[in-house]
C-alpha cells in the first residue's frame, strides 16, 4: 500500500547534501558580505573554519589545513599536480571519481611510473598489493559506488611514499587515521552540508617536506601553487586563501561546524551517519528486491549508501529497461515530494543512492524506505 507518512525533509542528494537540521537563511545573518576577504574580520572568519575543522577532526599537531578553490576536485588536483612525480605512484580506483584521478595522472601529467590497481563497482582493489615505496592515491569512500576502505590497517606507518586521500564523502563521518595519511581533501558540500565551490586540504609534515624539496617538471597554475621560493606558503593555511572565497559560504561553513560541536563533535556526527546506515541495513535484510552495491559488508558506506535492484523480474530485463526503472523510482518519489536527487550516479550501475551523512535525520530515512518498496512494486505490478 502507498505509505501515508513522508520524511520531514526530502533531501537525500549525495552532493550538495542536505543542510543541517533546523537550518535557515537566518544562519547567514552575520555574514561579512561587502567586505574584502582580506579584511581582518573576514580573514578571522575564514581562519575560524580552519580551526574548528581541525579541532573536530582531531588533526594532529604539525599538520596544516587550508581552504582552496574548486571544491574537493580542486584540492585533489592541487595535491597531485604539486606532489606527484618524485617517485612512482599507485593509483587505486573502484568508482568514477577515483578513475578521474587516474585520468589526470596518466593523460594529463603523463606519469610513466604510474601503476593502476582497480576494481569494478561494488568491490575494492587488492589493498595488500599496494606498493608503499610509491606514492598512493585513493578515495577513502567511493561516493558513486558506496564502497569504502574498512580502515587504515593496510597503510604502513613506515611507508616511503605519500598516502594521498580523497576523503570528501568520509571526512566528518568516518574515522580517519591521520598518522597513516599525508594528504587529505574534502569539500564543504558533503558531510557538513555546506555550500559548493570551496575545498579543504590537509598536509602532513611529510607532505610539506616533499613540497619544499621537490619541484615538478610541468608548469604549475597559480591556484595550485603552495610554495614560494622553496618554502610552504603558510598564509594559505592561516586564512589567506589563494583566491576570493564567498563570505556567505564561509558563514554557512562556520554555522555547520558549530552545529557539529553542539551534537558531540566527530563522535556525534559519526553516530548520526551510522544510524542512517543502520536503518537502511535493517530494511535491506527484510527485502527481496534490493541489496547494497558493495559486495562486502565491511566496506558498505555510511554516507553514500548505494543500492542495486536484485529482483529476478528486474534482472532478467535488458540493461536499458533496468536503467529506466531505476529512474522511474526516482521520478515517482520526487513527484510525491518524498525524496529528491537520489538516483545512482550516471557512470554507476543503475540503482539508488541515498545520502546518509550526519545532516540527514534517521527518522526521515526510515520514513523514506517504505516509499521505495511502494514505488518498485507499483512499477512491477504495472509492467
Image (cartoon, rainbow, N blue to C red):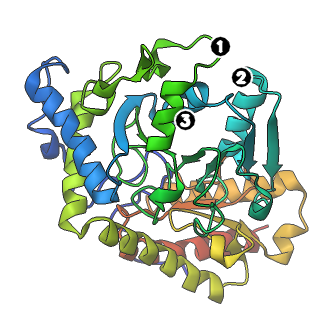
Mark 1 surroundings within 10 Å by alpha-carbon count, few (fewer than 14), some (14 through 19), many (20 or more)? few
What element does badge 1 sit on? Answer: loop
- Decide if residue 269 is on the left or right side of residue 226: left
Measured along the vertical axis of the image, is residue 320 above or below residue 231? below
Mark 2 surroundings within 10 Å by alpha-carbon count, few (fewer than 14), some (14 through 19), many (20 or more)? some
Q: Measured from the top left, where is residue 106 in percent x and y? A: 78, 29
Mark 3 surroundings within 10 Å by alpha-carbon count, few (fewer than 14), some (14 through 19), many (20 or more)? many
Judged by depth in the image, the label closer to the viewer, 1 or 3, is 1
Per the image, the residue denoted by label 1 is 218
Q: What's the distance in space between the residues labelled 2 and 3, CA to CA?
A: 13 Å
Q: Measured from the top left, where is residue 355 in percent x and y? A: 49, 60
Taking depth in this image into account, of 85 and 318 the one nearest to the observer is 85
Circle 1/circle 2 CB separation < 8 Å? yes
Quarter residue 63 falls in? top left
Which label's residue is closer to the chain start, 1 or 2? Answer: 2
Per the image, the residue denoted by label 2 is 109
Which label's residue is closer to the chain start, 1 or 3? Answer: 3
Image quadrant where one finds the C terminus: bottom right
- Decide if residue 68 is on the left or right side of residue 250: right
What element does badge 2 sit on? Answer: loop
Per the image, the residue denoted by label 3 is 76
Amino acid at each position: 500500500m502507498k505509505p501515508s507518512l513522508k520524511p520531514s525533509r526530502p533531501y537525500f542528494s549525495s552532493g550538495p547534501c542536505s543542510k543541517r537540521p533546523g537550518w535557515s537563511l537566518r544562519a547567514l545573518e552575520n555574514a561579512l558580505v561587502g567586505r574584502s576577504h582580506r579584511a581582518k574580520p573576514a580573514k578571522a572568519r575564514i581562519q575560524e573554519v580552519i580551526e574548528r575543522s581541525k579541532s573536530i577532526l582531531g588533526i594532529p599537531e604539525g599538520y596544516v589545513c587550508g581552504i582552496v578553490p574548486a571544491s574537493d576536485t580542486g584540492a585533489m588536483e592541487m595535491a597531485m599536480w604539486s606532489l606527484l612525480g618524485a617517485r612512482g605512484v599507485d593509483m587505486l580506483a573502484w568508482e568514477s571519481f577515483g578513475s578521474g584521478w587516474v585520468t589526470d595522472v596518466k593523460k594529463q601529467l603523463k606519469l610513466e611510473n604510474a601503476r593502476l590497481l582497480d576494481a569494478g563497482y561494488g568491490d575494492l582493489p587488492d589493498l595488500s598489493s599496494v606498493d608503499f615505496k610509491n606514492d598512493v592515491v585513493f578515495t577513502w569512500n567511493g561516493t558513486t559506488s558506496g564502497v569504502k576502505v574498512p580502515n587504515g590497517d593496510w597503510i604502513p606507518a613506515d611507508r616511503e611514499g605519500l598516502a594521498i586521500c580523497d576523503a570528501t564523502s568520509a571526512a566528518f563521518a568516518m574515522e580517519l587515521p591521520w598518522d597513516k595519511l599525508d594528504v587529505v581533501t574534502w569539500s564543504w558540500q558533503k558531510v557538513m552540508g555546506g555550500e559548493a565551490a570551496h575545498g579543504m586540504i590537509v598536509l602532513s609534515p611529510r607532505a610539506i617536506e616533499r613540497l619544499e624539496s621537490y619541484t615538478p617538471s610541468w608548469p604549475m597554475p597559480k591556484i595550485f601553487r603552495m610554495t614560494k621560493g622553496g618554502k610552504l606558503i603558510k598564509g594559505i593555511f592561516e586564512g589567506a586563501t589563494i583566491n576570493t572565497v564567498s563570505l556567505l559560504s564561509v558563514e554557512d561553513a562556520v554555522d555547520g561546524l558549530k552545529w557539529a560541536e553542539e551534537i558531540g563533535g566527530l563522535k556525534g556526527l559519526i553516530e548520526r551517519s551510522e544510524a542512517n546506515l543502520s536503518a537502511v541495513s535493517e530494511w535491506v535484510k527484510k527485502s527481496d528486491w534490493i541489496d547494497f552495491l558493495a559486495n562486502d559488508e565491511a566496506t558498505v558506506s555510511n554516507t553514500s549508501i548505494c543500492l542495486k535492484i536484485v529482483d529476478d523480474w528486474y534482472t532478467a530485463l535488458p540493461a536499458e529497461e533496468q536503467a529506466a526503472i531505476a529512474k522511474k523510482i526516482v521520478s515517482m518519489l520526487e513527484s510525491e515530494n518524498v525524496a529528491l536527487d537520489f538516483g545512482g550516479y550516471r557512470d554507476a550501475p543503475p540503482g539508488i543512492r541515498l545520502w546518509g551523512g550526519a545532516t540527514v535525520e534517521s527518522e526521515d530515512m526510515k520514513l523514506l524506505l517504505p516509499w521505495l518498496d511502494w514505488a518498485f512494486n507499483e512499477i512491477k505490478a504495472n509492467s
